[in-house]
Amino acid sequence: MRLSRYFLPVMKETPADAQIVSHKLMLRAGLIRQTAAGIYAWLPLGLRVLKKIERIVREEQDRAGAVELLMPTVQSADLWRQSGRFDAYGPEMLRFPDRHGREMLYGPTNEEMITTIFLEAVRSYRDLPRTLYHIQWKFRDEVRPRFGVMRGREFLMKDAYSFDLDDEGMRASYEAMFVAYLRTFARMGLQAVPVRAPTGPIGGDLSHEFHILADTGESALFYDAAIEEVSRDELLSADTSTIARLTGLYAMEEEEHAKVSDCPVPPERLRSRRGIEVGHIFAFGSKYSKSMGLSVQNAEGAQVHPQMGSYGVGVSRLMGAIIEASHDEAGIVWPDSVAPFRVGLINMRADDGNCASAADELYGRLRDAGIDTLYDDRDERGGAKFATMDLIGLPLQLVIGPKGVEKGIVELKRRATGEREELSLESAMARLSE
Ligand code: P5A
C-alpha cells in the first residue's frame, strides 16, 4: 500500500480526551475515531488489526471444534421476556420500537437467541455436543464508557455457546474453550491470567475471567507469581493439565480476595496488579435451556435440558490490551501476529530520483513476494516519516536513502528492539521472505 494513496490520519499532539496510553496511541496512530460517546469508527489501519485479531480468535475457535454462524445485532424483546432477562438487564440494554411498535433491542449478548435457534433444530442426544460461535457487534449502554475501545458502548465480541447432554460433557466443552483462550492470547503475545470469577447476570456457578496485566486495567487482582512463570510455549501447547495447573494457582479479583480469610499464597509470592478483562467464560447448566424450553431426548428416551456454557472474548477490547502490553515512548510495537502490515518501507528522499526509483522497485518486489508492505512514498521529511513509522509500530522498517542507493544497500530496522542492519537488496528480500 502506498501511503500517498492510503488513509492514515495520524495526530502529532496527544488528544486531550484520552487518559490511557492505548487510547491515546489508537487515536494518534489513526486506528480509530470516536463518532459518539463509546462508539468508534475503525479507520483502515485499525480495521486491519481488528481483522487480524478476529482471525486468530476464529482459528482457535475452529481448532477447538466450535462452529461459526452469524446472528443479527437486533433482537426481539420477546426472546428476552422468555428468559426473564428483559426486565432484569436494566438500562445497559438499548431498547427501541420498530414501526409496528414492537419492542426491539440491540443485542448485548446472545444466550436467548442461540438457544432458540438450537431448539428449533435439535431433538436428539445424537446432535450433542455442539459449540456454536459468532463474532458480532454488541451494544451495552455503559454508564461510563471510557478508555476508548476498552469500555465502549458498541464493541466487537466473539461469543460461543456450548450444548451438552450432561454436566460432565459441559465441563469438557468448558475446558476446550479454556484451552482455546490460552492459545488465543498467547498467539497475540499476551500473558493472560485466568481468574475464578463470580458470574453476575449471565448466571451459573463455574466461571473464569482472563486478564491481561496492565497498570491501566479496570480490575484489581491478587495472584500467585507462579502464574507468570507459565511460558508461552506451554500455553501454546495447553491441555487439561495446563488448566489444572493454572486454576490450581491462586488468582482472584480484589472483592473476592477480600472475602478469603486464609490466603493460601505465601506473602513473597502474592502479587497485586491491575488487569484488563479480555475474556470471560461461564458454565451455567440448564439456566437458559429450561427457561427457553429446550430439551432433547437422551439415549434412554427421556427428555432432558442440555447443559450449556457461554464464552466471550472482547475482540475490539483486545486491541487496546495489546497496545497497553506492547508500546514505548515512540508509539505502538505490534506483535507480528496482529501487525497491520509486516513491513514499512521508507523512502528518505522523495525528491531524489534515484531513491524514488530504487524504493519503487523494492516495493514492487515486496508486493510480488506477497509481503504486506506500507510504502511511505510521500513528499515528506525523513524525520517525519520515521516518527510516523515508529508511531504505527510495524514490526520491520526498510529504509532507502541516497548513500545506500549508490551502494545498493538498504537499512532494516526492527521496531521492537531498535536493532538496525545494512543489507544488500537481495539479502533484504531473502530475509523478509523467510
Ligand atoms: C459470554 C459470551 C458475556 O457476555 N455472554 C456471551 C457472555 N460475557 S461478558 O463478560 O459480559 O462479555 C464478554 C467479553 O466482552 C468484552 N466486553 C467489552 N468490551 C468492550 N467494551 C465493553 N463495554 C465490553 N463489555 C464486555 C470483555 O472482554 C468481556 O470479557
Image (tube, grey):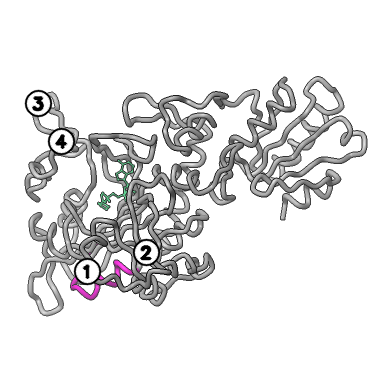
Taking depth in this image into account, of 329 and 147 the one nearest to the observer is: 329
Query: Residue at the location (67% across, 38% down)?
Result: 344
Q: Amino acid at mark 2?
A: Tyr
First reached walking from the N terminus: tag 4 or tag 2: 4
Q: Nearer the viewer, mark 4 or mark 3?
A: 4
On the image, which quarter does residue 198 sit in?
A: bottom left
Boundaries of the magenta span: 162-175
In the rendered image, residue 210, in percent from the top left (x then y), is placed at 36, 57
Decide: few, some or many residues near mark 3? Use Cα within 10 Å; few <14, some 14-19, many ≥20.
few
Question: Mark 4, mark 1: which one is toward the viewer?
Answer: 1
Query: The residue under label 1 is which amino acid type?
Result: Ser
Q: Which residue is mark 4?
A: 91
Residue situated in front as seen by the camera: 283 or 201:
201
Give the foreground label among 3 and 2: 2
Q: CA distance from mark 4 to mark 2?
A: 33 Å
Residue 16 part of the magenta-drawn span: no
Q: Residues within 10 Å of mark 4 (few under 14, many from 20)?
A: few
Image quarter hosting the C terminus: bottom right
Q: Which residue is mark 2?
A: 223
Query: Amino acid type of disc 3?
Result: His
Q: Is residue 169 magenta?
A: yes
The residue where tag 1 is placed is: 261
Q: Residues within 10 Å of mark 2 (few under 14, many from 20)?
A: many
Q: Callout 4, which amino acid?
A: Pro
Res 30 seen here: yes
